[in-house]
Image (spheres, rainbow, N blue to C red):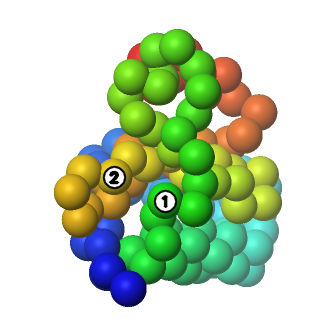
Amino acid sequence: MTKYKVELSKESREDLIDIAKYIKYKLKEPNISKKLINKLQKNINNLEYNPEIYPIIKEQYLEKLKLRKLLIENYFIFYRIKGHTVQIVRVMYARRNWNNLLK
């Protein structure tokens, strides 16, 4: 089984920080914040073993970018595969207008 390298974009790192801060400070749930971030990071790291399990998003513009997504609780992790590298593009709340934010 081929192992892929996982890289987080600047935006995806900022997304994770923003998610953690929002839940910790705005919702005043530090334990939930920590558990969610750990779960997101674990699933991101798991992409190094089988990133093709999630299909390319079938939207005209996004399909050209070859973006894929996986849902973890209420958050989408958007990524693409280039060679043997998984590039994490963004991590977003699922109810956001992510289609426009990815363009």
Instruction: Estimate the x, y position of residue 31 in percent, counting from the top left.
Output: 73, 80
Q: Which residue is mark 2?
A: 81
> What residue is drawn where x is 39% and y is 75%?
48
Front residue of this view, candidates 90 and 81 = 81
Front residue of this view, candidates 92 and 5 = 5
Q: Which three-letter amino acid code belongs to the residue tagged 1?
A: Glu
Q: Residue furthest left?
A: 83
Which circle marks residue 66 in the picture?
none
> What residue is drawn where x is 66% and y is 22%?
97
Secondary-structure class at tag 1: helix
Asked whether, in this view, residue 19 is left or right of residue 46, the answer is right
Q: Residue furthest bottom?
A: 1
Above or below: residue 46 compared with residue 89: below
Q: Which residue is mark 1?
A: 52
Q: Which three-letter amino acid code belongs to the residue tagged 2?
A: Ile
- Quadrant the C terminus occupies: top left
Instruction: Estimate the x, y position of residue 52 in percent, counting from the top left.
Output: 49, 59
- Quadrant the N terminus occupies: bottom left
Q: Residue furthest front?
A: 1
* Mark 1–mark 2 CB contact (< 8 Å): yes
Instruction: Estimate the x, y position of residue 94 in percent, counting from the top left.
Output: 72, 40
Instruction: Estimate the x, y position of residue 65 in percent, counting from the top left.
Output: 37, 28
Q: CA distance from mark 1 to mark 2?
A: 8 Å
Above or below: residue 44 compared with residue 66: below
Q: Earlier in the sequence, mark 1 or mark 2?
A: 1
Question: Does residue 22 appear in the picture of this structure?
Answer: no
> What residue is drawn where x is 78% and y is 60%?
73
Asked whether, in this view, residue 47 is left or right of residue 39, the answer is left
